[in-house]
Image (cartoon, rainbow, N blue to C red):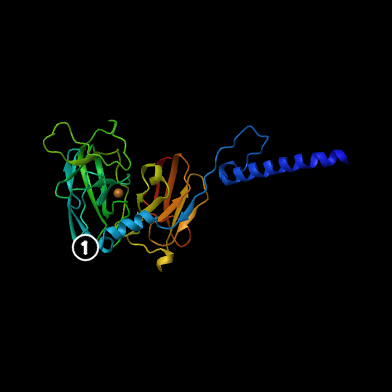
Amino acid sequence: MDRCRKLLPLLLVLGVFALFFASCSAENPENTATTATSTVTPPPTQTLTVVPRPQKIIDLMKARGEQDEAKPVLKVVSPGKDAVIDGSTVEVKLNLSGDLKGYMPHKDPATGKGNHIHVILDNQPYEAYYELDQPFELRNVVAGKHTLRVFPARPWHESYKNEGAFRMVTFTVKGGGDASKPTTTNSGQTMANNNSSASPATPREGKDVLSSTAGEVDPAKPLLTYSRPKGEYKGEDADPIMIDFWLPNAKLVGDGGEYRVRYIIDDDDARFIDKWEPIWLSGWLSGKHTVRLELLEKDGKPVENGVYNTTSREITVVK
Ligand SMILES: [Cu+2]
């Protein structure tokens, strides 16, 4: 009994220590499966949650005045509808009109950010086009039939979703680029000019593009156009990360229609977006991730329209 009394304070102290360490590891959800005696840390699991529009974007919107209520209208001047282009460089020229409320694509040289147009060849990741008074070049485009999709975006890459903002044209390249030639990798959010060394005096926005041709796309049918996320996300840009897309000819269930957008991150369970607006996901772990977006019919089957309605992209998160 006497010995027990002596041991009691020691046991209490040990108990407090145990609680302390338990609460420490509980704060880090990645380690909840680790027991005190285990020397093996299980691989961390990623739990993503949908969070509200980030405050820093709300602040940016306020600073932009009325711009986010703009209704920009794009027209594709070049390539013309069903144009046949000789050679591998496709000049993209766009005309911007509509109720702009100050919206104008331009890259601020100081921050490297600004309003821009998302330019999508076939179903590749988009390229950013900033200065509309100059053509934008898609380089090394392979021979065959292609689609070009364009729509305006904000500095944080959220697209404008008004009528007339989205355009798609189909064209054909004759001759074309060398499909075996290595092409530049996408630089994610760093939309650097890839100026051709052959014409240093006339710098132009543009990109070497990957080898691809169009699927058989019907512009009158529902067409999910994957926009974000893409590329590499670093530091505070990596949390949260926005999912955004364009959706002509289809209304989602939450908007009074019958379609749903399904998204699958890595090997997670499928989740749904039922309103046509961006969502923000928080909780990404460092490393490569796959983001898959699909447009589904009422019966849950993917909507067929070429191969564009199911798109997977790999993104990289660096924390
Ligand atoms: Cu963008």
Asked whether residue 101 appears in the rendered view, the answer is yes
Looking at the image, residue 225 sits to the left or right of residue 142; the answer is right
Is 292 positioned to the left or the right of 158 in the image?
right
Query: Closest to the observer: 215 or 155?
Result: 155
* Extreme residue in the right direction: 1
Q: Which residue is mark 1?
A: 101
Residue 124 against residue 200 in the figure, above or below: below
Residue 5 rendering spot, x and y as whole percentages: 83, 42
Which quadrant, please, contains the C terminus? top left
Give the quadrant of residue 276. Answer: bottom left
Q: Quadrant of the N terminus?
A: top right
Depth order, front residue of 142/95 = 95
Q: Secondary structure at mark 1?
A: loop
Residue 20 position within the rendered picture, expressed as x and y whole percent measured from the top left: 64, 43
Instruction: Say left or right for 242 vs 138.
Output: right
Which residue ends up furthest to the left in the rendered image? 201
Mark 1: few, some, or many residues within 10 Å (few <14, many ≥20)?
Answer: some
Residue 111, image x and y in percent? 26, 45
Identify the residue at image location x=68%, y=41%: 17
Seen in the picture, residue 147 relative to 66 is either above or below; the reply is: above
Q: Identify the image quadrant of residue 247.
A: bottom left
Residue 11 at x, y = what percent?
76, 41
Q: Residue at x 27, y 42 (%)?
A: 191
Q: Amino acid at mark 1?
A: Lys
Does mark 1 have its CB less than 8 Å from ligand 1?
no
Task: Name the residue: 63% across, 39% down.
Answer: 34
Extreme-bottom residue of the structure: 256
- The total of numbered circles placed on residues is 1
Task: Tell me, yes or no, if residue 313 can be seen here.
Answer: no
